Amino acid sequence: MRKPVALRLSAALGTLALAAATGVVLSMPTASAAAAGATGFATQNGGTTGGAGGTTVKATTGTQIHAALCGRASTSTPITIQVEGTITVGNTAKVSGAGCNTAAGVIELKGISNVTLVGVGTGAVFDQIGIHIRQSSNIIVQNVTVQNVKKSGSPTSNGGDAIGMETDVHNVWVDHATLVASGGESEGFDGLFDMKDNTQYVTLSYSILRNSGRGGLVGSSDSDLANGPVTFHHNRYENIDSRTPLLRGATAHVYNNYYVSLNESGINPRAGGKAKVDNNYFKDSKDVLGTFYTDLPGYWQVSGNIFDNVTWSEPGEDNNPAGPNPTSNTTVSIPYSYTLDAASCVPSIVTATAGANTGLKVSDGNCVATTPTATSTSTATPTATATPTATATSTPSGTNLSIAADSDGSSKASGTSYGNVRDGDTSTYWSPAASTGSISIKWGSATTISKINIREASGATGNIGSWRVLNADTGAVLTSGSGAGTISFTSTSLKKVTFEITGSTATPRVAEFETYA
């Protein structure tokens, strides 16, 4: 019989304590999260780019993280915050400003968008302090360690969740994170990675979740069913009692994960939840897939998994294990492309790539660890500005395809019109109702374009800050950057293209939104 979680930690915690005491850490890349792009469901619904195209700043305390958020022009102005050092409850104070809504004792990402939080240098450790994402979108958290966050005892933070998302959250990518606890609920801990109350389009990739009673949930109760979809891939779950994850009504794609010592149960879809479970490796574990602790059934589609020393309980009224010979009882459609590593090499590839301080290494799809090419290696300063991923050039030649098209967009300012951006008249314009917004050109049939030209109205030159260009048919991000002008991207056939303004210095005025083949 396995011992309780808290009693199985002394050796692991001793090793961690020794490393902390001697200052032994691995060197980290200085590049931001732009070293690799989002994957899985975080690529849908408009994509997840975080702070791409915005300012890059450095923070060594939680208060400095909050100050960086609050120092933005608005809650949606893109920013990349490079974190180095140890963040604690003691060095995390509430900060106020136009670009934030923070709280003391927790890293609070509330009511904001377009933010990247990435560990750099000698590493970023959030010690006994959680990351709380609420009413926010387009968030990237990468290359960080979050450890020993408690909901009872001292100090407490984030309800005991290492990373918690709740209340109208969408498009979050957490990558190369290490999330660890030192026991279960009786020791004061809760979940490592929780999503609830309308949290959608999330990906957790190349991360470690270890030494916890609860891995994480999607949906806080059997009536909280408006969450997901979520992707979990190339993660290592180790010494976890349950919830890897728990899916209440949600859809999850679970592939190429390495599960070791799941002590009570593992992937637990219930109340209509669905899991597509591909090419995972389960080792020395119990009841790794099924519906548990409820009579509300969940469903699964399975293929290519390896079950190494896995035991299964008998079915019962509140217990429906998928094994000992798991077969599919549903189908799950996946809208994005992905490459599966063979399950046999999952232990080695996940061990080589998962967690913070691994150089952001990923699998090449053939079980070989590779390091993505970083887009920037410059050292951040409080006033540094990242180089846009697209730059303005001269007006393109050819036919402006917008003239014969249609248009729509987000809420417009009084006295402006969507049609003004495709009438060939630079004296008329469209403005969003707020400091950010989106404008689209659309056609009745698929049209191939590779360039757009954004012309600002007279008197408003330079007002447009950061932006994204989206294939509105699929939600894919074609490119991102800052400043108006000509923008090039890979030639794409689509019916609708969207120019989304995510940051501005003053009210944007788009006189013309030209499109070219």
Image: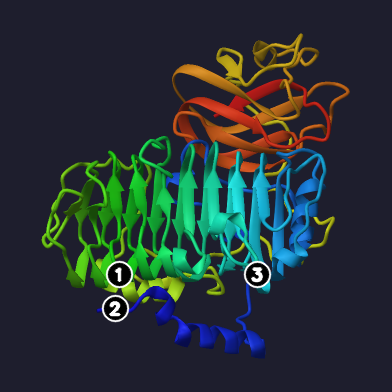
| 59 or 296, nearer to the observer | 296
Quarter-of-image position of residue 130 = bottom right
How many residues crowd mark 3 within 10 Å: few (<14), some (14–19), many (20+)?
many
Secondary element under disc 1, as helix, strand or loop, is: loop
Residue picked out by circle 1: 263
The earlier-in-sequence mark between 2 and 3 is 2
Residue 8 in view of the camera: yes
Q: Are marks 2 and 3 in contact (CB under 8 Å)?
A: no
- Provide residue 236's location: percent of width, then percent of height: 39, 68
The earlier-in-sequence mark between 1 and 3 is 3
Residue picked out by circle 3: 124
Residue picked out by circle 2: 2
Instruction: Give the amino acid type for the residue marked by disc 3 in the picture.
Output: Ala
Q: Residue at x 75, y 49 (%)?
A: 69
Instruction: Give the amino acid type for the residue marked by disc 2 in the picture.
Output: Arg
Q: Residue at x 63, y 79 (%)?
A: 27
Q: Residue at x 75, y 66 (%)?
A: 90
Q: Residue at x 39, y 63 (%)?
A: 234
Quarter-of-image position of residue 454 = top right
